[in-house]
Image (tube, rainbow, N blue to C red):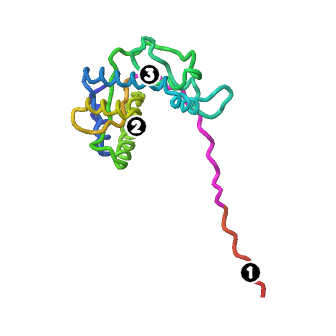
Amino acid sequence: MPSADLAEATEAAHQDGATLWLPEHTSRIRLLELTAEAEQRNGLAPERLAEGLNWIAGPGDDTGVPPRALGTLDSDGLLPMRNFTPQRTAGRPKAKYEPDPHLLMLATRSDHPADWLRAGQALQHALLILTLHGLRASMLHQALEWPDLRSRMARALPQRGAPQMLLRAGYGPVGFPTPRRMPVPPTDQPVPEPAAAVA
């Protein structure tokens, strides 16, 4: 990634009260290992598999994420992309991924509700900057969903803080568009005028 684009995204996150950090090689390997461990756990946890079934659209279903919109999996099995539900994503296409991906870690100083808000704003801001420069990003959030793995992710940070999102960023193909629901018309009806009093 061009350093100027990364610096702009980093500054955007900083303006919103978060840090966007580019891990060095050893930390990248560790973060990917933790992500792979989380993905393996997700595939063995019945409640996670059931949750995935609710997210992914089934045959003839017009709600949920279409399986084709999930993108490809790494043909070498090195990059742990979220597989959601194997029952609905069987036959998902594979592609050869870069062996050493660019990762970005979004973190906040502490981990309170106000920090979650800052993290969301910073993530939105950084993603818009990356998109503006023609870069793509995918979220490797699996390890953040397991408290023990999230704590281990925090140890990879250069300074104390709370990891909020791990991104894989770079250049790549345009993703498949996902459907949008039609807006629900407002149900507020004008309040009728009170009836005139009968004398």
Marks 3 and 1 in Cβ contact (< 8 Å):
no
What residue sits 74% from the left and 83% below the top? 197
The part of the image, by quadrant, that contains residue 186 is bottom right
Judge whether residue 174 can be spotted in this image. Answer: no
| Residue furthest out toward the left | 159
Residue under numbered circle 1: 196
Compared with residue 88, is residue 113 higher up or lower down, i.e. above or below?
A: below
Give the mark nearer the N terminus: 3 vs 2.
3
Amino acid beneath label 2? Leu
Dominant SS type (magenta): loop
The part of the image, by quadrant, that contains residue 63 is top right
Amino acid beneath label 1? Ala
Give the mark nearer the N terminus: 2 vs 1.
2
Mark 2 closeness class: few <14, some 14–19, many ≥20 residues within 10 Å: some
Residue 40 image label: 3
What residue range appears in magenta? 171-188
